[in-house]
Image (cartoon, rainbow, N blue to C red):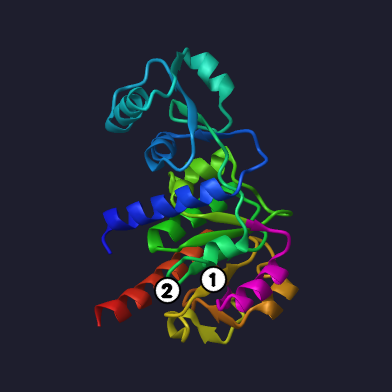
Amino acid sequence: MNKRNQRSKHKQKQKNLSQRKPNSESSQIVEGRHAVREAILAGTRKVREVNMSEGLESGTVLEDIANLSKELRIPLRMHAKSKFKSMTTVESAQGVQAICDPLPDLEIEDLVEETENPFILVLDGITDPGNLGSIIRSGECAGATGILLPRHRSVRITPTVSKTAQGAIEHIPIATTGGIPKALTRLKELGVWTVGMDMAADEDIYDLRVVHDPLALVLGSEGRGLGRLTRERCDLIVKIPLSGITESLNVGAAAAIGCFEISRQRLTKVKR
């Protein structure tokens, strides 16, 4: 499946999901040029207004945002630099902000049902918004079909997450759950293998035997890694073999390697 068809397929599924479950939040702020453009292009939720700083140098992304706003009749408001800066929350919003309807509030079943060969990222206690954004971006680029986050003791989808993800949150379903260990049990009931990543594992991710089946790749928090109960509930535990002196990888880097290794193995089977 080429990138255009994948994008169209994800867009249709996101539309279906957004119509199914409302979110209790009234709105979400998206900042950063690529993130705002993708929020408009995806069409999976309403963009209520776009705010821009005056004095920006013209560029393709800014032109796209302005043209799309005009075409879709999204209010586009210009602000003085000082005023715009006072409105934003991230360190560098790149002169663009959008006020959007919230992402749909999804459940575990939404990530599995009507999904061909699910590949879900389960994130157990990620607290750094930059890490979460980069993981979502890597997962979407590698072909992951969904993200599962805990409702507590974890960063949520913030403007920083949205900006770091560069619009990926608009193209991949994101569900939440009350507890990751219980969620892993539910995923097993739904026919999904649960594969935890831990540097203490005996098996390498390169030798993962269930890569072609529905699976969930489980990553732990930045400090302690997988929680004890989470680790116990996983079907398999794998590691990324390291050759250097440093003992571990940043969770964002580990997630990227894990996602693209699973993608590589899945594509290898298809090509054969």
- What residue is rendered at 37% in x and 39% in y? 41
* Crowding near the residue tagged with mark 2, few <14, some 14–19, many ≥20 C-alpha atoms within 10 Å: many
Q: Image quarter for residue 9?
A: bottom left
Q: Is residue 68 above or below residue 262?
A: above
Mark 1: which secondary structure?
strand
Chain part drawn in magenta: 176-196
| Badge 1 amino acid | Leu
Q: Position of residue 134 (x, y in %)?
A: 49, 53
- Taking the magenta stretch, the answer to whether it contains residue 179 is yes
In this view, the residue in front, 250 or 183, is 183
Q: CA distance from mark 1 to mark 2?
A: 9 Å
Q: Is residue 208 above or below residue 253?
A: below
Residue 250, visible in the rendered structure = no
Q: Quadrant of the C terminus?
A: bottom left
Name the residue tied to disc 2: 262
User: What is the number of the mark on residue 37?
Assistant: none
In this view, the residue in front, 161 or 27, is 27
Tell which residue pokes out farthest to the top in this image.
80
In the picture provided, is 154 more to the left or to the right than 141? right
Mark 2: which secondary structure?
helix
Q: Image quarter for residue 263?
A: bottom left
Q: Is residue 17 above or below residue 183?
A: above
Q: Position of residue 74 (x, y in %)?
A: 42, 24
